[in-house]
Image (cartoon, rainbow, N blue to C red):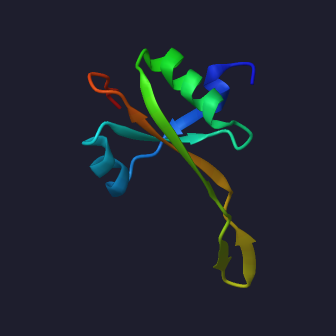
């Protein structure tokens, strides 16, 4: 990956991710081709924090129907990033 901003797309803000934020864990939508090492380096450089661990989840597309038209949602790769003690990110 060339740029760290290409790896980290956006934070994911849901009820579950808000609960995890209390435990110093942040959830991001990331590039599907990025690996855990690249994600860790990108978060550390962009937010000036220390990362303890990175877990990733590939979310498969789901079928959606609107009237007679059938389609699929986009596939997404999520990264659940646990920060070390003393580090925090304000979103």
| Image x and y of residue 75, in percent | 68, 56
Q: Which residue lies furthest to the bottom in this view?
A: 68
* Image position of 51 with respect to 79: above or below: above
Q: Residue at x 32, y 23 (%)?
A: 87
Q: Which residue is drawn at 65% across and 78% down?
A: 66
* Image position of 14 with respect to 89: above or below: below
* Image position of 71 with respect to 56: above or below: below
Q: Which residue is drawn at 40% across and 47% down?
A: 13
Tell me where residue 90 sits by quadrant.
Answer: top left
- Of residues 68 and 8, the one nearer the viewer is 8
Total marks in image: 0
Quarter of the image that includes the C terminus: top left
| Image x and y of residue 48, in percent | 43, 14
- Of residues 22 and 67, the one nearer the viewer is 22
- Horizontal side, residue 5 vs residue 24: left or right: right
Q: Which residue is drawn at 31% across and 26% down?
A: 88
* Image position of 72 with respect to 78: above or below: below
- Horizontal side, residue 32 vs residue 79: left or right: right
Quarter of the image that includes the N terminus: top right
- Horizontal side, residue 53 vs residue 2: left or right: left
- Of residues 42 and 82, the one nearer the viewer is 82
Tell me where residue 49 sits by quadrant.
Answer: top left
| Image x and y of residue 17, in percent | 37, 49
| Image x and y of residue 33, in percent | 74, 40
């Amino acid at each position: 990956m060339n740029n760290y901003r290409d790896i980290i797309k956006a934070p994911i803000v849901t009820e579950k991710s808000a609960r995890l934020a209390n435990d110093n864990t942040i959830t991001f939508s990331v590039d599907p081709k990025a690996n855990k090492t690249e994600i860790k380096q990108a978060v550390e450089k962009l937010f000036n924090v220390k990362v303890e661990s990175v877990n990733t989840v590939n979310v498969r597309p789901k079928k959606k129907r609107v009237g007679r038209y059938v389609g699929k949602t986009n596939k997404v790769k999520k990264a659940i990033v646990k920060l070390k003690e003393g580090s925090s990110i304000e979103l």
